């Protein structure tokens, strides 16, 4: 999810499409939050680790 967010954010910057940039940033933030929760030992969506 983080990688997809980075790709969309870069595409949004290069193509000057603000919607892609905002979606990319949102995916990066959600991916980082899920990653931190998984590393802290909390079960995320039924999984102990989020990959």
Image (cartoon, grey):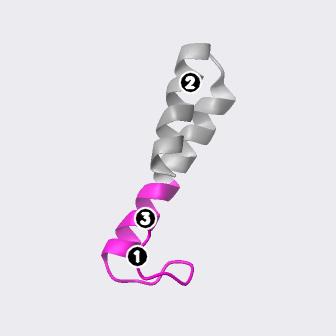
Residue 49 is marked as 1
Residue picked out by circle 3: 51
Expressed as whole percent of the image width and height from the top left, the position of residue 17 reads 66, 21
The span shown in magenta is 30-51
Mark 2 or 3, nearer chain start: 2
- Residue at the limit of the structure toward the left, as seen here: 40
**Cβ atoms at labels 3 and 1 below 8 Å apart:** yes
The residue tagged with tag 2: helix, strand or loop? helix
Classify 26 as above or below 32.
Answer: above
Q: Is residue 46 magenta?
A: yes
Q: CA distance from mark 2 to mark 3?
A: 24 Å
Q: Residue at x 42, y 82 (%)?
A: 48
Residue 22 lies left or right of residue 48; in this view the side is right
Q: Residues within 10 Å of mark 3 (few under 14, many from 20)?
A: few
Residue picked out by circle 2: 11
Q: CA distance from mark 3 to mark 1?
A: 6 Å
Q: Residues within 10 Å of mark 2 (few under 14, many from 20)?
A: some
């Amino acid at each position: 999810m983080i990688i997809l967010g980075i790709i969309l954010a870069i595409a949004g910057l290069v193509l000057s499409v603000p919607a892609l940039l905002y979606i990319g940033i949102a995916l990066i933030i959600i991916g980082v939050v899920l990653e931190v929760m998984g590393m802290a030992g909390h079960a995320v969506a039924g999984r102990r680790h989020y990959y």
